[in-house]
Image: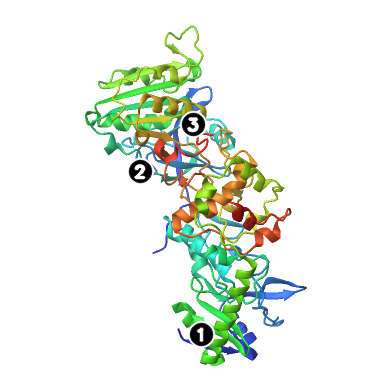
């Protein structure tokens, strides 16, 4: 049988574009071009420009697929110039999903930073979908300013969900902000979970990942229970082109979520 | 295994015969250098199976430096004409072995590579005269084909001795059987003696083996060791592009009228932007890290994945290096 071409993207229409912050937008696609599980990622193609890896921000149980994307480079700049009704290409899903079966019956402690909230939203919605399976879900999130908080419009309804505990912080507040101020680790002094048994999930920019992981290790989480979303240059997505390798792991194939146990011996894994 | 003799006066006839079935590429020497040459029935240039591997590696034939891997909306990217690679040395077969693992055995299968591989018949050749750059014996190889190829040939005094490894190799022999005679025990003895001599020469060129725990020593090398190793490197990247086992590539999209072509080009982990992400972070921003990554990739990680080094011992990296950095010297020092 002829093998499917793994480099060919599925053309998909952009249904809606939601501005989240001055530099972040959520792209809602028309339907589900690919089926995925929380934690897996896809390559998005801007026709004629190129492709880049993103983890969906929507629930795997939803009818549409969403990507929340920050404008940082060439492909994302072109993506931001697209309009509703334009087409993108989707390849995937790639990598491994969060091992949700290992989270069952436990407190799940999630820490996000900046646009790292995107994959975390997908995980959060997947957990909420079967919320009775988990003891409690803790969500800790930090953004640079109140304006940079992603999903502001969704947070009030998430806070109302029974079994969910959300704490936010911003690096720099403003007149409207009455919450915590400081980088995300300032809201990690109090970790109200059983650190010996609970899984913890981290996703954010490299420096945030580095210091949050340090804090979680100090707090007593087991290395194999610290799940880290790794940001690497995943070009092919199928473990062949070699760009995303960290130590012996291909982030596109063995990740994108690796545990601290996997990478703790690697020098500067969050560089 | 049964051996067949292709008498010297039939060698060009054999090449001409298989050239009727597909393009034939073989080693031809000129001005002291051996290059891969396309067989031309009008010119009929004499092959040179005695010299070491050709200056070029054979990865172009399976994994061209630039090729379209997908086109959209209509994907018509897959094309691979039938080709024969004749006279390939065992060091270059290590490269094919690496590619077969990465592109065929590691899921998902790469259909573009698969098609090229299926349409390429490889006839390897013994390497009777290793040179000072050769170190296949240090990476677990012999100077003669033992598999991976479809057929292996050994130059003997009266012609070429053929040993068939695969069914499609047998089909080639069947197609050209009128050109062959049965080999004798004397031919086999001549082959064994030639091989023994080549192995002895390799052992003289490379008196010391790499340490058994070379992978661990690479993993724990100090920054000082890494700095000393890359000190003369001018980042020309020749060593990586000329390497028969390097398989890094980059995907880029290009507009062609209303269509888009997705193009795969060779990449190399010494390029500063190789691992850089869209946001600007770069896990291997220093030359120290990039230079050492090559050693980690070939001698540590690939060995963990597949149980052998992603190095062929062909010595092209040393010969092609602007600073003449000898990979053996770095590994021996560890």
Tell me what residue is drawn at x 60 percent, y 80 percent. B19
Q: Nearer the viewer, residue B174 or A209?
A: A209
- Secondary structure under badge 3? strand
Q: Which residue is mark 3?
A: A69
Q: Specify the quadrant of the image occupied by residue B225.
A: top right
Chain letter of the residue carrying label 2? A
Q: Which residue is mark 2?
A: A35
Across and down, in percent, residue B287 comes to: 64, 42
Tell me what residue is drawn at x 54 percent, y 31 percent. A80
C-alpha separation, residue under disc 1 versus residue under disc 3? 58 Å
Circle 2 packing at 10 Å, graded few (<14), some (14-19), many (20+), is few
Across and down, in percent, residue A152 comes to: 41, 19
Q: Specify the quadrant of the image occupied by residue A95.
A: top left
Q: Is residue B17 above or below residue A175?
A: below
Q: Is residue B284 above or below residue A239?
A: above
Given contact means CB atoms under 8 Å apart, are the residues at marks 1 and 3 in contact? Answer: no
Across and down, in percent, residue A243 comes to: 54, 46
Q: Which residue is mark 1?
A: B173
């Amino acid at each position: 049988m002829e093998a499917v071409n793994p480099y060919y993207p599925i053309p998909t229409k952009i249904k809606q574009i939601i501005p989240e912050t001055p530099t972040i937008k959520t792209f809602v696609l028309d339907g589900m071009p690919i089926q995925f599980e929380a934690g897996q990622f896809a390559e998005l193609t801007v026709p004629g420009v190129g492709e880049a890896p993103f983890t969906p921000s929507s629930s795997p149980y939803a009818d549409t697929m969403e990507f929340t994307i920050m404008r940082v480079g060439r492909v994302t700049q072109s993506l931001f110039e697209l309009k509703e009704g334009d087409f993108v290409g989707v390849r995937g899903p790639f990598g491994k999903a969060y091992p949700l079966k290992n989270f069952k019956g436990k407190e799940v402690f999630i820490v996000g930073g900046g646009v790292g909230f995107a994959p975390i939203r997908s995980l959060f919605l997947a957990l909420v979908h079967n919320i009775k399976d988990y003891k409690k879900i803790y969500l800790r999130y930090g953004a640079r300013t109140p304006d940079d908080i992603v999903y502001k419009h969704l947070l009030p309804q998430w806070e109302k969900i029974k079994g969910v505990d959300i704490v936010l912080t911003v690096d720099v507040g403003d007149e409207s902000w009455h919450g915590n101020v400081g980088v995300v680790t300032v809201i990690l002094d109090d970790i109200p979970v059983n650190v010996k048994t609970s899984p913890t999930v981290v996703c954010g920019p490299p420096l945030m990942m580095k210091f949050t992981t340090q804090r979680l290790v100090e707090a007593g989480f087991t290395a194999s229970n610290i799940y880290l979303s790794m940001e690497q240059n995943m070009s092919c997505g199928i473990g062949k082109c070699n760009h995303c390798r960290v130590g012996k792991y291909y982030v596109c194939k063995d990740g994108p979520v690796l545990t601290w146990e996997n990478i703790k011996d690697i020098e500067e894994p969050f560089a | 295994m049964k051996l067949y003799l292709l008498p010297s006066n039939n060698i060009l006839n054999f090449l001409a015969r298989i050239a009727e079935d597909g393009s034939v590429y073989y080693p031809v020497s000129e001005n002291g250098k051996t290059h891969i040459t396309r067989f031309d029935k009008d010119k009929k240039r004499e092959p040179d199976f005695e010299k070491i591997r050709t200056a070029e590696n054979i990865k172009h034939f399976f994994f061209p430096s630039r090729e379209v891997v997908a086109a959209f909306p209509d994907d018509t990217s897959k094309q691979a004409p039938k080709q024969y690679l004749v006279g390939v040395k065992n060091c270059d077969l290590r490269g094919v072995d690496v590619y077969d693992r990465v592109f065929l055995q590691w899921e998902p299968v790469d259909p573009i590579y698969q098609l090229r591989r299926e349409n390429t018949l490889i006839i390897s050749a013994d390497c009777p005269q290793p040179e000072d750059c050769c170190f296949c014996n240090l990476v677990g190889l012999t100077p003669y084909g033992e598999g991976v190829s479809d057929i292996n040939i050994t130059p003997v005094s009266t012609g070429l001795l053929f040993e068939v490894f695969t069914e499609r190799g047998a089909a080639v022999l069947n197609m050209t059987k009128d050109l062959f005679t049965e080999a004798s025990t004397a031919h086999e003895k001549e082959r064994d003696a030639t091989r023994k001599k080549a192995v002895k020469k390799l052992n003289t060129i490379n008196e010391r083996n790499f340490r058994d725990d070379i992978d661990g020593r690479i993993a724990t090398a100090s920054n000082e060791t890494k700095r000393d190793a890359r000190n003369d490197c001018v980042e020309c990247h020749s060593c990586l592009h000329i390497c028969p086992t390097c398989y890094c590539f980059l995907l880029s999209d290009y507009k062609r009228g209303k269509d888009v072509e997705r193009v795969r080009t060779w990449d190399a982990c010494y390029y500063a932007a190789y691992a850089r992400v869209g946001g600007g972070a770069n896990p291997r921003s220093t030359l120290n890290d990039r230079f050492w990554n090559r050693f980690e990739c070939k001698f540590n990680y690939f060995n963990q994945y597949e149980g052998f080094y992603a190095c062929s011992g062909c010595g092209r990296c040393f010969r092609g290096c602007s600073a003449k950095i000898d990979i053996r010297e770095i590994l021996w020092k560890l």
